[in-house]
Amino acid sequence: MAVVAQTRRQSQLARFFADQRKWTPYVFVAPFFITFAVFTLYPMLRAITMGFQESVGYTGQWDWVGMKNFTEAFTDRRLAVALKNFVYYTAGSLGTQLPAAFLLALLLTSTFLWARGFFRTAFFIPAVLPGVTMGVVGAWFFNESRGFANELWLALGGDQRIPWLSLPRFIMPMLLTLAFWQYMGNHAVYLIAGLSGLDKSVLEAATVDGANGWQKARYVTLPLLKPVFAYITITAAAGSLTAYEVPYVFFTGAGTGYGGPAGQGWFFMPYIVWMAFNQFRMGYATAIGWLVFIIALVITILQLRAFNIGELD
């Protein structure tokens, strides 16, 4: 019986390969699945186990430590600073950029504005600049001896130069200033696209009903742009979680290291990189990465619920 079963399986396999139409599709999809397994699935599964391990120096060996990495994360002072900075950075970015981007989008869609294409491009250019460039420009802008911020401060009546990059209380204002310059125009472009896709008859009906420009923007345009605002807030929060280039270049260029002045400039990604490649604690860095993933998942779900995205009205 075993010989008969084996013969039947061999004949079925021979018939399968004899018919090119049956195995050819698998050849075409195989590169994707192989690439996915090697570069995505395996690293993800390995990262799960790494979160419960700790590397032993540079030996390539790993010790199983269980939940120690995760429990340590909840008492890590630097990680608490990173969480606080993430909350302030996200709230400050959305609180300053969204209103300005909406007003700018209304201005750049006005039929009375001359050279609208030029202004749209000018405001969007900072969004395509690399984060390293933004960090370098920011470090120059707030430089104590030759930065534009101090020159402006002195021109407005300041009595002495301010060491912006050395004082912890200026960390968030400086980063929010750079973020406003870099991303406000980008958000405005999305809102311009949303405004261009609105049903003109709705706005015309509001005009016929006697609504002025502000009333149309407040009670008609804003509700219709809810999906665009949802996309902007979700991507902005994700960008704040993964902020790396600007804080890294900004603080290391100023000589204050990864953590900024007095260690008050930590963000999640710079801390993970510092912990993994400077302290060589790969397991702990991986555990922090999973905590950041959970934070991103929770925030995204809350934002989708807040905007009623994916729910039936």
Image: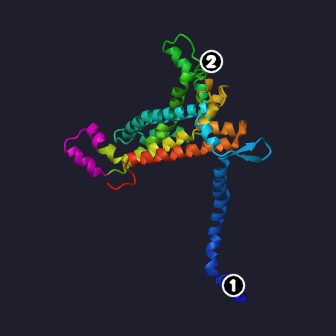
Residue situated furthest top in the rendering: 159
Q: Amino acid at mark 1?
A: Ala
Question: Is 141 situated above or below 243?
Answer: above
Question: Is 7 situated above or below 214?
Answer: below
Q: CA distance from mark 1 to mark 2?
A: 78 Å
Question: Which image quarter: residue 27?
Answer: bottom right
Question: Is 182 situated above or below 300?
Answer: above
Residue 287 image offset from top left, x and y in percent:
62, 44
Residue 145 image offset from top left, x and y in percent:
62, 18
Q: Is residue 163 visible?
A: yes
Taking the spot 56% from the left edge, 18% from the top edge, the residue there is 150
The range drawn in magenta is: 199-219
Nearest the camera: 38 or 173? 38
N-terminal label among 1 and 2:
1
Taking the spot 68% from the left edge, 87% from the top edge, the residue there is 8
Residue situated furthest right in the rendering: 59
Query: Would residue 89 be found to the left or right of residue 39 on screen?
Result: left
Q: Is residue 117 visible?
A: no
Q: Amino acid at mark 2?
A: Ser
Count of numbered badges drawn on the protein: 2
Q: Which mark is residue 145?
A: 2
Question: Which image quarter: residue 23?
Answer: bottom right
Nearest the camera: 42 or 21? 42
Residue 97 image offset from top left, x and y in percent:
44, 35
Residue 137 image offset from top left, x and y in percent:
60, 30
Query: Would residue 243 be found to the left or right of residue 217 on screen?
Result: right
Local secondary structure at mark 1 = helix
Q: Which residue is mark 1?
A: 14
Quarter the C terminus occupies: bottom left
